[in-house]
Image (spheres, grey):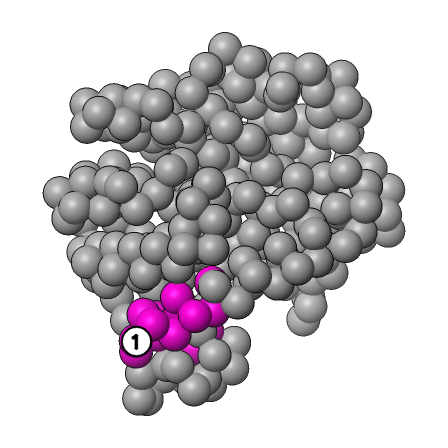
């Protein structure tokens, strides 16, 4: 945090996960149960307050806070996806932060861009379903920016296929407008693609998720970003690859813009060449 501030970087603070003492009974300890919601949202509110006060005391100039990560997936809301539970946690966190500084920008949790053929209420919701419930649940005034993770599947951001992350973001934006929320920006708090060299089947386009594909994703993303007025900041996920273990390729380890040896992938040059489009 100190290094980022020293180099003039703006910081988005992500408030997420639950310590063992605040988890419900029976939840796994440690990282295995870190995405169980707390048993009392007062714990989360106190946490948010302490973090905000710490940032202020350090003089880091933090103004932006994101509350939780992908709660529309059971992986990140381990008791089963629940809009009412997340909405109450969002409200508790937002109110606590605004008590410290009423000008804080509260970014709702970055929603996973999930395309469901078969609804699975306890396991995953599309961002459209989740946002609809945020509005109907009365939580419209508990966030000032909407967080989304606009990942592609096997089509670039310019695609209008309904399963593409960018198209789901466009559809979500329509819902914001229809609910009188056009003044809010959408923050793309995760964007990118893996280079795990997975090859899709022919009926899915036959794409290989390699470094060339990653370059195309960032180039298309820059072009779409430049012509979309309602987007806030876009965050590349992520900087460095991680090493695979056990002889198995894990897609999560290959989202980096740099390889494990620190060398740049071609997408880095694409971003540099198109950086003006991201402003």
Residues rendered magenta in the picture: 32-48
Q: Residue at x 77, y 38 (%)?
A: 8
Place residue 263 in its image quadrant: top right
Q: Is residue 47 magenta?
A: yes
Q: Where residue 249 appears, x then y in whole percent?
A: 63, 57
Locate residue 199, reporting x and y percent.
Answer: 55, 39
In the image, taking residue 185 as reference, residue 39 lies left or right, namely: left
- 273 left or right, relative to 150: right
Left or right: 8, with 114 as reference point: right
Vertical position of residue 239 compared to residue 163: above or below? below
Tell me the SS state at disc 1: loop
The residue shown at (70%, 20%) is: 275
How packed mark 1 is, by other alpha carbons closer than 10 Å (few <14, some 14-19, many 20 or more), is few
| Residue 195 shows in the view | no
- Quarter of the picture containing the C terminus is top right
Of the pair 213 and 255, the residue shown nearer to us:
255
User: How many numbered discs?
Assistant: 1
Identified at 77% across, 54% down, the residue is 2
Q: Nearer the viewer, residue 5 or 29?
A: 5
Q: Which residue is under mark 1?
A: 40
């Amino acid at each position: 945090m100190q290094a980022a501030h020293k180099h003039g970087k703006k910081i988005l603070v992500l408030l997420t996960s639950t310590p063992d003492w605040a988890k419900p009974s029976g939840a796994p300890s440690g990282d295995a149960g870190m995405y169980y919601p707390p048993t009392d949202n007062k714990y989360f509110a106190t946490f948010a307050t302490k973090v905000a006060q710490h940032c202020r005391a350090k003089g880091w100039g933090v103004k932006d806070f994101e509350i939780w990560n992908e709660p529309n997936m059971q992986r990140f809301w381990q008791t089963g996806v629940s809009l009412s539970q997340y909405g109450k946690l969002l409200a508790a966190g937002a109110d606590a932060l605004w008590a410290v500084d009423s000008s804080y920008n509260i970014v709702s949790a970055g929603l996973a861009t999930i395309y469901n053929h078969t609804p699975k209420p306890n396991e995953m919701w599309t961002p459209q379903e989740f946002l609809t419930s945020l509005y109907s649940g009365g939580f419209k005034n508990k966030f000032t920016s909407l967080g989304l993770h606009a990942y592609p599947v096997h089509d670039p951001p310019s695609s209008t296929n309904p399963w593409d992350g960018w198209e789901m973001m466009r559809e979500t934006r329509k819902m914001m407008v229809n609910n009188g929320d056009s003044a809010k920006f959408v923050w793309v708090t995760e964007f990118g693609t893996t280079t795990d060299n997975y090859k899709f089947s022919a009926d899915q386009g036959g794409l290989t998720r390699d470094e060339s594909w990653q370059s195309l994703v960032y180039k298309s993303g820059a072009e779409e970003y430049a012509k979309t007025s309602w987007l806030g900041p876009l965050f590349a996920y992520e900087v460095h690859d991680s090493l695979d273990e056990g002889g198995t390729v894990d897609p999560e380890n290959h989202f980096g813009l740099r390889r494990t040896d620190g060398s740049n992938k071609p997408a880095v040059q694409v971003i540099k060449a198109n950086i003006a489009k991201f402003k």
